[in-house]
Image (cartoon, rainbow, N blue to C red):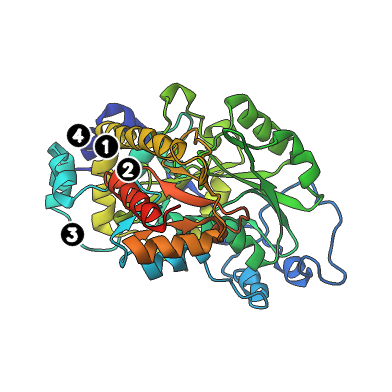
Amino acid sequence: MLRCDRLARLAIGPTAAARLHAPSCEALPSVESLSSREALEAARPAAGAAGADHEPRTTNHEPRTTCFSARTPVFGVALRVGRGRPVRPFKLERYFAEYEFKAERVLSASDCETLSMAELLGMAAGASLELWRELRLGYTETAGHPLLRAEVAGLYETIAAGDVMIAAPEEAIFIAMQTLLAPGDHVVVVSPAYQSLYEVARHIGCGVTRWELEPERDGWRLEVGRLGELVEDRTRMLVINFPHNPTGYTVSRPELESIVEFARARGLYLFSDEMYRLLEYDSSARLPAVCDLYEKGISLAGLSKAFGLPGLRVGWLATRERTLLGRCLAFKDYTTICAGAPSEILGIIALQSREPILLRNCEIVGGNLAVAARFFAERAGLFAWFAPKAGPVAFPRWLGEEPVESFCRDVLDGVGVMVVPGSLFERPGNHFRIGLGRRDFPQALGRLAERLRDRRV
């Protein structure tokens, strides 16, 4: 059997292999060594409750939930308090569960064209192919396969393999929120947003303020200068998402840096959903990862969207704050414990083949964006088109007399095309999401045009 460090050099090359020698998760503090403030947290009333603590937070900014040890049952404080606030149905995911596999075409998918198993394995060579052939279906490391974490680290400037936790993307959101937030905390979230980016915090008992994107004549706008009006003394975290789902908006690098400096000046955590990063229309406009810019930055990413591999369920959190990562790993023992062994090896193969995969997907998105722009320009009386700046989604507006929900249902019933109404993102204004990442987008859009002709609108 090959030693892990030797196998790393064979499989991923010297640069990524060198990252394996950075401090790994073995150097993270043990669960027993983590400090605890459970009595204070259990006693704190929930946000908005009588006697709630609205005093400014102390300056040490220690994470206050899941700082548990074998001696102190602080784990579960947020979950226990949250039982009084049932988790609301995940509107978008319930909609997909109902219609995605019944519809003939999906116009609103946010992932890119997926690969077949044969296509992905066809990209494997050398040691990575041997890893697949010799794979044993046992348990895997909680933090993730060392080679997979090394490949992930290669996507960043300052991140080592030991700064990465592998998890399904939705799981990673849940773990991060449960680890960092406590009842009575406050979170500011760019909105509209994927529901779990704010719903988990709300369920815990946090106050949530939406930082709204506003439509303009030819796109979207986020007023970065408004951030100071939205935070409170009890604000714990900012949640951002660029390239943005569902609008395709992204900020400029100076704007992102101003958000980072705002968070740094106040000691706030900055959680950055970067699932659509690497799908910029111009790679020179790609934003740096938040985990590279800020010591309290947490980057969420994965293989589902840009790589078109949602079936692997491989995502990750990347952060330079090792104590936080240790707490996340301890919490993961109560979710999946570890990733699936086949998915990890396939993830290694995908990351080693990222250039051709991303090039293919960017070409698909670019071609579909041109098709969409023409389609909506020709139907300006029916739709308002807000051009995306990056990523595989856009958020146009239906201008017809009926509500967008009725319009989407009519298209599904009439021509078998699933369209996601903007109300699933809790956004008024008759918007709907379209997905630009799949090869059948022109055909799905053609079905929509057919339905519009049938309706004579």
Q: Would you say the residues marked 4 and 2 are in contact, meaning their CB atoms lie under 8 Å apart?
A: no
Q: Is residue 144 left or right of residue 253?
A: left
The residue tagged 3 is 136
Q: CA distance from mark 3 to mark 4?
A: 20 Å
Q: Secondary structure at mark 3?
A: loop
Question: Closer to us: mark 1 or mark 3?
Answer: 1
Q: Mark 2 = which residue? A: 307
Query: Looking at the image, which is closer to me, 454 or 332?
Result: 454
The kind of residue on which mark 4 rests is Leu
Q: Secondary structure at mark 2?
A: loop
Question: Which callout, 3 or 4, points at the residue further toward the start of the chain?
Answer: 4
Q: Is residue 442 visible?
A: yes
Q: Residue furthest bottom?
A: 84
Q: Residue at 14% across / 38% down in the picture?
A: 125
Q: Nearer the viewer, residue 349 or 242?
A: 242
Earlier-in-chain disc, 1 versus 3: 3
Q: For the residues labelled 2 and 1, say whether their Cβ atoms are less than 8 Å apart.
A: yes
